[in-house]
């Protein structure tokens, strides 16, 4: 039996998604192999020992607090010590969870941790750094301009002249479409910029990509492998509600109906992006396929959703892997990478 700590919740706006993912992992994880302790992070950042049977969609602000003491494997304690920990599974999305911060904290504990490490997590969280690294590797991305807090904000017309009439405004570090706005006229401009700056000090303005939105699941350390691809068919923005509620305006198709050449190009791009961004363990690479056949990377998610309707586990299930096997492999990869 391995002693596992699953961490969920967190301070980012994706708190609830993390808990939905965590509940699903708890339902599917092989109990004959893992003894699971659940640690919840409240919205204000309190770490609490959770009773998994009463885990809801919000971590409360009070409860049995958890302390962490680096220096031995017996480093987590709640009301009592958790025992020697073999592996940690942080199912946290967004800033202060998926961005290398928690990964750094856990690295100090010297215990295997599921998902990319500090560098892969942090560069993949920042959409601008992601683009620069992918560009350097010759991987296509949507043209963009960067705005930092305090910069003079260009007018819509100035940007539209460079990038086209339809623009995407988004915080550099966020997820679940929080703060993302599609702008097609000057009247929408300042609200979109203000909205994105609510979530980050860096805001990207991107050219609108026209094509099919396709996602690929990548799994592995030194020789990562790519799943088939899934397609997202949504409104103009694949929105928060469409991602997590049963939506009538969005659907996901697995496997996507693509030619074998397209599939090869998508899988190759996904693996190249994964390597360029120093990812290990897992990541989901989100791409656009243009009519011309060009594949562009929109973003990479180092801790993609694991809810019952999430693309990452579904893509592997389509390859014949069960959810339980996927969790096993993620844990094995964490242990292998740690050595
Ligand atoms: N440049 C773009 N062109 C076309 N659609 C985009 C573009 N950027 C984002 N989108 C749409 O908005 C959604 C959310 O944007 P994304 O960059 O993936 O942010 P998040 O990290 O919040 O998921 C995408 O899934 C896509 O539907
Ligand atoms: Mg996205």
Image: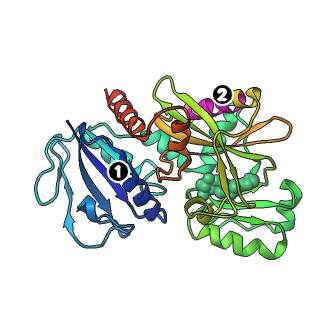
Could you tell whether 310 is left or right of 19 in the image? right
Q: Quadrant of residue 132?
A: top right
Tell me the residue that label 2 is attached to. Answer: 268
Coordinates of residue 40 in the picture (x, y in percent): 31, 60
* Magenta stretch: includes residue 61: no
Front-lying residue, 97 or 128: 97
Coordinates of residue 206 in the picture (x, y in percent): 74, 55
The extreme top residue here reads 223
Q: Which residues are magenta?
A: 265-274
Numbered badge on residue 57: none
Could you tell whether 233 is left or right of 285 in the image? right
Circle 1: element type: helix
The extreme right residue here reads 161
* Magenta stretch: includes residue 266: yes
Front-lying residue, 329 or 181: 329
Q: Is residue 270 above or below residue 198?
A: above
Q: Nearer the viewer, mark 2 or mark 1?
A: 1
Q: Is residue 268 visible?
A: yes
Tell me the residue that label 1 is attached to. Answer: 27
Coordinates of residue 127 in the picture (x, y in percent): 61, 50
Coordinates of residue 225 in the picture (x, y in percent): 54, 27
Image quadrant occupied by the N terminus: top left
Q: Is residue 133 above or below residue 56?
A: above
Circle 2: element type: helix
Image quadrant occupied by the C terminus: top left
């Amino acid at each position: 039996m391995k002693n596992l700590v699953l961490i969920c919740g967190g301070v980012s706006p994706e708190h609830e998604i993390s808990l939905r993912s965590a509940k699903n992992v708890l339902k599917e994880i092989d109990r004959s192999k893992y003894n699971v302790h659940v640690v919840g992070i409240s919205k204000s950042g309190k770490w609490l020992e959770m009773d998994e049977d009463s885990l809801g969609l919000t971590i409360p602000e009070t409860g049995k607090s958890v302390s962490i003491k680096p220096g031995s494997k017996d480093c987590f304690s709640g009301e009592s010590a958790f025992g020697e920990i073999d592996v940690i599974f942080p199912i946290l999305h967004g800033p202060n969870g998926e961005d290398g911060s928690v990964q750094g904290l856990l690295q100090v504990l010297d215990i295997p941790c599921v998902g990319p490490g500090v560098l892969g997590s942090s560069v993949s969280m920042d959409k601008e750094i992601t683009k620069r690294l992918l560009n350097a590797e010759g991987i296509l991305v949507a043209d963009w301009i960067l705005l930092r807090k305090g910069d003079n904000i260009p007018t819509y017309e100035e940007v539209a002249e460079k990038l086209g009439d339809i623009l995407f405004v988004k915080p550099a570090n966020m997820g679940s479409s929080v703060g993302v706005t599609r702008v097609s006229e000057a009247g929408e401009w300042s609200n979109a910029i203000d909205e994105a700056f609510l979530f980050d000090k860096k805001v990207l303005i991107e050219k609108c990509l026209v094509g099919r939105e396709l996602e690929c699941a990548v799994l592995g350390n030194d020789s990562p492998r790519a799943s088939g691809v899934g397609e997202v068919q949504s409104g103009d923005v694949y929105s928060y509600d469409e991602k997590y509620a049963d939506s009538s305006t969005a659907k996901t198709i697995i496997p996507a109906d693509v030619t074998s050449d397209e599939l090869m190009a998508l899988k190759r791009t996904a693996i190249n992006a994964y390597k360029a961004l120093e990812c290990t363990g897992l990541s989901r690479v989100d791409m656009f396929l243009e009519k011309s056949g060009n594949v562009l990377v929109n973003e990479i998610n180092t801790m993609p959703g694991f809810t019952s309707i999430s693309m990452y586990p579904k893509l592997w299930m389509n390859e014949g892997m069960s959810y339980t096997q996927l969790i096993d492999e993620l844990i094995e990869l964490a242990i292998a990478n740690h050595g």
